[in-house]
Image: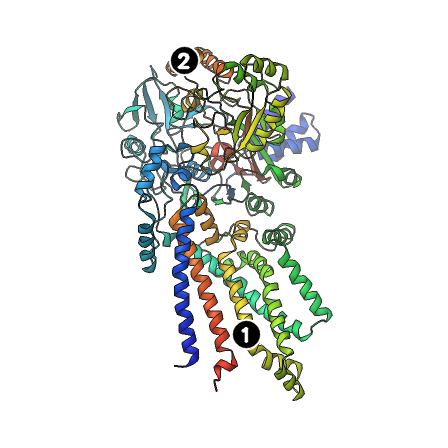
Amino acid sequence: MKDKFIKAQQEKLTLGAIDRRQFMTSAIAAGIAIPTALSLASDAIAATPKKGGKFRMGLGHGSTTDTLDSGTSENHFTLVNGYTFGNHLTEINNEGKLVGELAETFESDDGKTWVFNLRKGVEFHNGKTMTSEDVLASYEHHMGEKSTSAAKGSLSPVRSIKADGKYKVIMELDSPDTDFPYIVSDYHISIRPAGDMTSGVGTGGYIVQSFEPGVKSVLKRNPNYWKEGAAHFDEVELLSIVDPNARQTALISGEIDAMDRVDLKTINLMKRNPNINIMQATGTAHYTFPMRLNVDPFGDYDLRMALKWAVNRQELVDKILLGYGAVGNDIPIGTANYFHNSDLPQREFDADKAAFHYKKSGHSGKIQLSAADAAFAGAVDAAQLMANSAKKAGIDIEVIREPNDGYWSNVWNNDAKGWCACYWGGRPAETMMFSAAYVAESKWNDTMWKTTDSAVKFNQLVKDARKELDESRKRDILYECQRLIYDDGGLLCPLFNSYVSANSKKIAHGKIAANWDSDGAKCVERWWFA
Amino acid sequence: MHPVVKTVLERLGLGLATLFFVSIIIFSAIEMLPGDFGQAILGQAALPETVAAFRQELGLDKPAYIRYFDWALGAIQGDLGTSFSGRNASGADRSAEVVDKIAPRLWNTLFLASMAALIAVPLSLILGILTALYRNSFFDRSVNTATLTTISFPEFFVAYILILFFASLNQIFPSLANVDPDTNFGERIYRTALPAFTLTLVIVAHMMRMTRAAIINLLASPYIQMAKLSGASQTEIILKHALPNAWAPIATVIAFNLAYLVVGVVVVEVVFVYPGVGQLMVDAVRTRDIPVVQGCALIFAVTYILLNLIADIIGIVTNPRLLHPK
């Protein structure tokens, strides 16, 4: 009862309905000691977004070839910058849920025809009102023969796009896809005014003042921003600081307020600094060791199983990620995904099971595992650790250190190498991840898991899942898809890496999103100065 | 023709010939670099046909000697070609002229180099003369120890130590030297202070010890003893009699260090996030952006040749025997 009352008073305080003094009076009246009441009041005030201040952030990416055209966005700097000045039809909120952004609502009866109802009264930075004409022009920028956009591939299922009046856009797909609204939240597909796709005019919470590729982007708050409770800073400076040490020094000496990609080797020293908060978010990004079924000996089910049991996953989390991550369960879907199959038992190191399957496979001799740090930082060490644990099960893994140069063309996804290290950023929707690397027609199918009975069944189920509008049936199908990969697939996924970032204690924020680094790459419009 | 003018012209001709050979070396060295721009930029998405299309679009399928002459003829006219990067996996072309890419960065590098040189050169000359004057004294030994210590550490270490004391523990100077074209002059000096100090510490020892050695070397020669016998003071001997003859070796070592300031400070640039030309070149090598690498290498070569030429000329014109031919 008392808690409820205090909570209600706290809410009033944050909304400004009562002031601090009134809050204190009622808290003391409810029998709460003064120090406790004081801290309750500060907690409530800190959780309320406040306007103002200049936010400076150091990002570990950025190159001299960056632009303001969202179609060419390809690193985290352009991603954060793009989400700061632009909006999309939908967005993934900090709870990991898909919600409408410039589309107030979106609906489909069959998963094939999608209707996006646009928000009214949204203004671009140049004063133009956003209508369906701008949405069509923005989508055409990413579609069609001549488009140079990186989103061309993900929009290829769109057969037609047309406007129905000023505030409705209808998209027709080649085949049903109930996860299509996730695709339109992609950072590439920013909505810009018709006729100007490249100069950085958007509808976002901040207006670009100056942009120097590979150096910095300076922005100022959009006074007419339509979104409520967002864009709290007055000014923003995004700096490209690629050297991790320089980034950390800048944060410690107060030259920036936040940074991404903390160097795990020195994180314990950073933690000792009383003015700095370390944050981590385990999302959809994961490290994998794909085995190609069309290359000997990985076509053998028992051999794959033996290797899956021969990895000490917790050791990899502790030594490669220094604890900043989670163990993987040989499925490319993480706990941050909505339909993550948590019924599958977590695979752990089991020398007996590994030896049993290895014996059954009848294989003898060395198994080659190619790795380079181009795949992910620490990939070669991870491969060595795997070779060590596999030795306990009597399996002989030979680690081949490959050059970083040309790794993605000569080693990964190449029949010359049956087994190698790789990483994936993950996808917000399960079917999107499956389409990227696990369905038969994907060019990036790095496990070549296409022809086994389970793989054939999997391909059919992914198609079914895309059609399914009912949530519980969709869950069943996607759970089964994950079980098939877990059991039969060529995927060995031992690690889900966390995004580790740091910021000054002056910064306040709500729950941190896990779909991208930097609060879903939307920290600039979500955070504020406490 | 006056012998000085003749020697200068000779050196100039030699410089141009060197530049020609250097351009061939640069070109063939880059030819031998492993990897391929298409593969580097396409990464996970590099399919054989897209890589081939890329190579054709960039003219990389032409024979090497044709590409060399295209490049060399352009470079003579001040056109270093168009950067490869700016073309992404989907083929979008937003590439920039190499000259436009290098120019602002080169200006930053020259600014930092001049700042470091303005501190380091007078400092090392003064220290060199003073240590020669008071050689083997306590002052001489401590200056030598201090400068040799700073030159012995790798420059990133010196940089981090300076950051620790002047940016982290005592926040006197900024640890980020991220200047941009709008930064005003005073702010620019303030922001580049720490990198300039780092470079100063790294190069002072070399120039200072050369000055000291060159002067001490001369002090043993007969004409100095003659001057001494004629009653000239120690200061007079060093400044009036020894120094004019010592300029040639000193100028050479100063030129060497100035060239280093322009071409070799990439580590310092990375540590202080300074947008200089060294970082641009390293980025370009990483992404196999050949025109930018070639452009930077050529500019570096010109810097070296030019500074050495100036050092030679200084050596000649300050040499009393050449200045006053009999």
Image height check: is B252 above or below A187?
Answer: below
Image height check: is A57 above or below A516?
Answer: below
Inspect the image, locate mark 2, and give the three-letter code of the amino acid beneath it: Val
Chain ID, mark 2: A
- How far apart are the two marked residues, 2 and 1, measured between alpha carbons? 82 Å
Residue that carries the numbered disc 2 in the rendered image: A456
Report how many numbered discs are placed on residues in the image.
2
Residue A142 visible, this angle: yes
Residue A347 percent coordinates (x, y): 58, 17
Label 2 packing within 10 angstroms: few (<14), some (14-19), many (20+): some
Residue that carries the numbered disc 1 in the rendered image: B247
Residue B277 percent coordinates (x, y): 46, 54
Extreme residue in the right direction: B138
Q: Quadrant of residue A199?
A: top left
Extreme residue in the bottom direction: B230
Image height check: is A516 above or below A307?
Answer: below
Asked if labels 1 and 2 touch by Cβ distance under 8 angstroms, the answer is no
Residue placed most toward the observer, A466 or A408: A408
Q: Is residue A144 left or right of residue A443?
A: left
The quadrant of the image that shows the C terminus of chain A is: top right
The quadrant of the image that shows the N terminus of chain A is: top right
Q: Residue at x 59, y 64 (%)?
A: B206
Residue placed most toward the observer, A351 or A108: A351
Residue A112 percent coordinates (x, y): 32, 18
Residue A503 percent coordinates (x, y): 57, 39
Chain ID, mark 1: B
SS at badge 1: helix
SS at badge 2: helix
Label 1 packing within 10 angstroms: few (<14), some (14-19), many (20+): many
Inspect the image, locate mark 1, and give the three-letter code of the amino acid beneath it: Trp
